[in-house]
Amino acid sequence: RPSVVTWLSTFLNELGKEGSQHRIHGLFEKALGSDALQKSVMLWRCYLAYELHMCNPAAAKRVFFRAIHACP
């Protein structure tokens, strides 16, 4: 069973590595593609914060609207 804590620890582990932007993006997409985690507000907020931290407002806007759709 997927766990939010497991995914968050994986993201944190990848943050310390150089050139991990695409891996982290893929991990968020994979985690949120799971039926069990698709409605996880915590994961959506972390994904949004990550995109904002990476100075990518267009991606953050897309994540925001997807989150609203997934977690009404």
Image: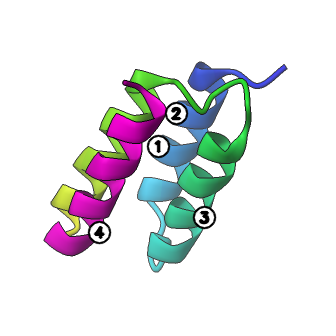
Identify which amino acid the numbered label 4 is placed on: Ala
Task: State the SS at label 1.
Answer: helix
Question: Looking at the image, which residue is at 48% across and 66% down?
Answer: 17
**Would you say residue 2 is visible in this rendering?**
yes
The quadrant the C terminus occupies is top left
Q: Is 29 in front, or is 4? A: 29
The tag earlier along the polypeptide, 3 or 4, is: 3
Above or below: residue 16 compared with residue 42: below
Q: Which residue is mark 4?
A: 59
Q: CA distance from mark 3 to mark 1?
A: 14 Å
Task: State the SS at label 2.
Answer: helix
Lateral position of residue 24 relative to residue 48, left or right: right
Q: Which residue is mark 3?
A: 26
Give the total number of marks visible in the rendering.
4
Chain part drawn in magenta? 57-72
Question: Looking at the image, which residue is at 55% across and 33% down?
Answer: 9
- Of tags 1 and 2, the one toward the viewer is 2
The tag earlier along the polypeptide, 3 or 1, is: 1
Q: Which residue is mark 2?
A: 8
Looking at the rendering, which quadrant does residue 31 occupy?
top right
Marks 2 and 3 close (CB-CB < 8 Å): no
